[in-house]
Image: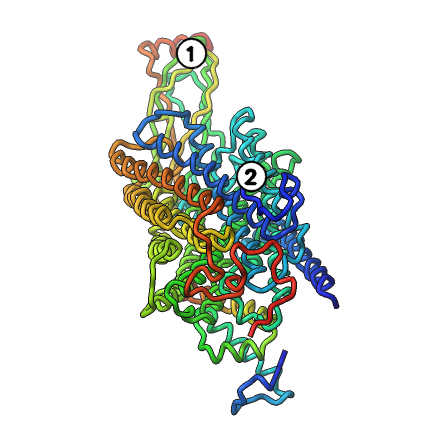
């Protein structure tokens, strides 16, 4: 084999290596994806640090959401979902719906109560419509959220919590309005 | 490639039949020393006369794979 | 433009004219072209560095818009790496490899011509970006998406320039490997090859293995930009971090592509001026091979902060630290070569000794950065800038100066001006330290890189660095003068040039004739 031929052979071999490496660059994409999938590295988005480790997955609490109106409150008030199940430590949002059926704007305030009563100290509300007064214009409908976590320290024997809200009418002449309404209906 | 006339005769000069396995071992030794980056001159001379480049490359790739394995094992020990 | 410069010192005994340089297939001509190209680009990218240092002399914006500042840092990096260091080393290889192994020319002379002439095209593309609407690329030399997917038309031009430079490097490497493996003179066995030839052989293999991967990565950027693919586009389900993995698969071996030929040059110069053979030649060869293999398994240390699992961080930390072993072997070998040698300190040796000291410092700051928790603090600060300038300026660049002074008499036939050479050395080595040493402290204090403005407390150290930078920049004009003087005339160089020089190239007359070793020499 002459020197030039030997050089040609070498050129071919090295050229093939270069082309193969170009392909290898593209092959790295499925390779890395497969590697991460198999080895469990880089589970895209599921950040180790950001994970909530406080959730007690071993038990579920049945949460009954009750809605009541004070007798001189001319609204319709109900929970969107009367019963939900939630793990202690799990962040949860539930919604209530209020409708003002009267022809005047009414400001109301919701007062919660719990059964069993000892649940109060374990029921941590982050956001609630009961924190503030709520004003509804005539015939307005409003969806109102409650964002809460049940403390995992909740005693094990508590399996059901009833959360009940009662809306009170804060208008100064509430009695009269209610009376008029009654009168009109009666 | 192999020129006996130029070589010092050594006690463990290999028989032709055994050459294959022993040169594998020799390539492995060569690669081990190369990872450290040092090699005795006489050993280097005998590497050059006894080994084909392909053997060294293959041994080098195996050596690199073993090294990666060893570091991964160390990482496993540290993190477990 | 480089051709006209090179033309100025055309060999008298050969037909000159522009076409000679354009059509030349002679390895010496092409080597000269590469070296002039690198020198011109060195001043282009260097002037960008001067603008950067001028802007950073004071906090607040003085001379330019922040966007232009970002273009300068990006182009400075790209041009210095692809337009200066790599072509300069390729120029050395073109000149020296055939002379050192006793070959008449490179294996593929025409391809050699092509691989050089691709470079000016790429350079015009790169510099031309500044004149496009939106200016040059400003996303950093690492070309990370999403910036490189979102940018304007200069980003396309940049991708093409990288393709062209990659093709040039691959062809150059194929040429060098074939020359070294097939065209050695009789008796020039692999184990007798000079260290410079060995390091270039391994570098060329690294280039062939990694340059196509870079070409693939930028091709994917291009298709993401224009052809609706989503390799790296998060909006389409791609992963920008994937680009970093592919880029650094190229990028880390690239670091060794930029430094292995430097090791080779230094391994030629130190034995010459210590008048002793290189200590541990065999171990040098092995260490070079080992560094080359290790360079493929450490890329993750560039990405410690992207959200890697702890096991990955530990793997890359350990493997990175392992590289210190073969590199340390090399440094010890150089020191052992100098040990009890009868040393003289001509300019090449001064640069070589400075290389050994300062490159080691750059290596140590690299070890600091290899420690994951430290790196997370120092990522993208001036500490990193200090680190890679210590390895690239006092490492790669100083070795290029050393090699240029060392072989200039062989190339031109004239001794360079030793006084000016020493002045160039002392000014460079002192100002280089004034320029880059304070950056370590700036980085430790938290100054981020690639930002045109900084907090007031960084002012003094930035001013020290800028002053050092201006002195360093001005000193390089001395180098230009030295080279031009040696090209035009000067004391006649002997064949051997240096008392302690060993090797085939020193058996030739100075200047080396246009055609050499047409009948192969016998090597004992």
| Residue C132 is at least partly visible in this image | yes
Label disc, if present, on residue A182 of the rendered structure: 1
Q: Are there few (<14), some (14-19), or many (20+) residues within 10 Å of tag 1? A: few
The percent coordinates of residue C6 (x first, y second) are: 55, 42
* Residue C423 relative to residue A27: left or right: left
Please determine if labels 2 and 1 lie on a single subunit. Answer: no
The percent coordinates of residue C77 (x first, y second) are: 46, 41
* Residue C329 relative to residue C439: left or right: right
What element does badge 1 sit on? helix
Label disc, if present, on residue C2 of the rendered structure: 2
What element does badge 2 sit on? helix
Q: Quadrant of residue C10?
A: top right
| Residue C378 is at least partly visible in this image | no
Label disc, if present, on residue C153 of the rendered structure: none
Q: Name the residue at 40% across, 23% down.
A: A69
Q: Are there few (<14), some (14-19), or many (20+) residues within 10 Å of tag 2? A: some
The answer for how far apart the CA atoms under marks 2 and 1 are is: 101 Å
């Amino acid at each position: 084999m002459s020197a030039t031929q030997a050089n040609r052979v070498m050129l071919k071999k090295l050229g093939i290596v270069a082309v193969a490496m170009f392909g290898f660059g593209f092959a790295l994409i499925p390779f890395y994806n497969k590697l991460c999938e198999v080895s469990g590295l880089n589970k895209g988005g599921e950040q180790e640090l950001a994970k909530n480790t406080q959730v007690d997955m071993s038990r579920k609490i049945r949460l009954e959401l009750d809605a009541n109106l004070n007798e001189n409150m001319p609204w319709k008030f109900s929970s969107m979902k009367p019963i939900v199940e939630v793990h202690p430590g799990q962040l949860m949002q539930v919604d209530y719906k209020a409708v003002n059926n009267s022809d005047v704007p009414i400001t109301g305030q919701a007062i919660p109560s719990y059964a069993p009563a000892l649940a109060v100290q374990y029921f941590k509300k982050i956001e609630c419509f009961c924190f503030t007064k709520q004003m509804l214009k005539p015939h307005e409908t409003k969806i109102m959220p409650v964002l809460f976590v049940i403390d995992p320290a909740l005693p094990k024997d508590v399996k059901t919590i009833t959360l009940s809200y009662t809306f009170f009418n804060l208008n100064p002449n509430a009695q009269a309005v209610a009376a008029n309404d009654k009168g009109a209906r009666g | 490639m192999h020129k006996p006339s130029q070589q010092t005769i050594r006690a463990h000069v290999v028989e032709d039949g055994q050459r294959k396995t022993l040169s594998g071992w020799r390539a492995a030794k060569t690669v081990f020393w190369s990872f450290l980056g040092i090699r005795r001159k006489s050993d280097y001379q005998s590497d050059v006369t006894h080994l084909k480049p392909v053997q060294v490359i293959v041994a080098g790739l195996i050596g690199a794979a073993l090294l990666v394995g060893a570091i991964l094992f160390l990482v496993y020990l540290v993190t477990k | 433009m480089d051709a006209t410069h090179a033309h100025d010192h055309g060999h008298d005994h050969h037909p000159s004219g522009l076409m000679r340089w354009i059509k030349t297939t002679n390895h010496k001509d092409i080597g000269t072209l590469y070296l002039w190209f690198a020198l011109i680009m060195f001043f282009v990218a260097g002037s960008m560095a001067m603008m950067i240092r001028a802007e950073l002399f004071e906090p607040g914006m003085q001379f330019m818009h922040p966007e232009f500042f970002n273009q300068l840092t990006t182009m400075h990096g790209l041009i210095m790496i692809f337009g200066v260091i790599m072509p300069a080393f390729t120029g050395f290889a073109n000149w020296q490899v055939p002379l050192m192994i006793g070959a008449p020319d490179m294996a593929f002379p025409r391809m050699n011509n092509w691989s050089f002439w691709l470079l000016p095209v790429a350079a015009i593309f790169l510099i031309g970006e500044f004149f496009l609407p939106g200016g040059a690329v400003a996303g950093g030399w690492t070309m990370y998406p999403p910036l490189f997917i979102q940018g304007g038309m200069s980003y396309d031009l940049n991708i093409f320039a990288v393709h062209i430079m990659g093709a040039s490097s691959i062809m150059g490497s194929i040429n060098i490997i074939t020359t070294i493996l097939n065209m050695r003179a009789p008796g020039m066995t692999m184990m007798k090859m000079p260290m410079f030839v060995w390091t270039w052989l391994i570098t060329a293999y690294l280039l062939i293995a990694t340059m196509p991967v870079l070409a693939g990565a930028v091709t994917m950027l291009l298709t993401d930009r224009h052809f609706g693919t989503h390799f790296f586009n998060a909006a389409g389900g791609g992963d920008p971090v994937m680009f970093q993995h592919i880029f650094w698969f190229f990028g880390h071996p690239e670091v060794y592509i930029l430094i292995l030929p430097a090791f080779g040059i230094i391994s030629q110069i130190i034995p010459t001026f210590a008048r002793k053979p290189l200590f541990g030649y065999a171990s040098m060869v092995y260490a070079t091979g080992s560094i080359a293999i290790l360079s493929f398994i450490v890329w993750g240390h560039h990405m410690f902060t992207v959200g890697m699992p702890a096991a990955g961080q530990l793997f890359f930390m350990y493997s990175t630290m392992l590289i210190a072993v073969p590199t340390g072997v090399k440094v010890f070998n150089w020191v052992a070569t100098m040990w009890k040698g009868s040393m003289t300190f001509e300019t090449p040796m001064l640069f070589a000794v400075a290389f050994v000291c300062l490159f080691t410092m750059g290596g140590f700051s690299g070890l600091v950065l290899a420690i994951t928790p430290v790196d997370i603090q120092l990522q993208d600060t001036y500490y990193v800038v200090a680190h890679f300038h210590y390895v690239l300026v006092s490492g790669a660049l100083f070795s290029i100066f050393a090699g240029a002074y060392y072989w200039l008499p062989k190339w031109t036939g004239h001794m360079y001006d030793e006084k000016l050479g020493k002045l160039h050395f002392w000014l460079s080595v002192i100002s280089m330290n004034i320029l880059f040493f304070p950056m370590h402290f700036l980085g430790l204090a938290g100054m981020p890189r690639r930002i045109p403005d900084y907090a007031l407390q960084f002012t003094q150290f930035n001013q020290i660095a800028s002053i050092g930078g201006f002195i360093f920049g001005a000193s390089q004009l001395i180098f230009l003068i030295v080279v031009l003087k040696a090209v035009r005339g000067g004391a006649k160089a002997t064949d051997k040039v240096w008392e302690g020089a060993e090797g085939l190239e020193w058996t030739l007359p100075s200047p080396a004739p246009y055609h050499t070793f047409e009948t192969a020499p016998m090597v004992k």
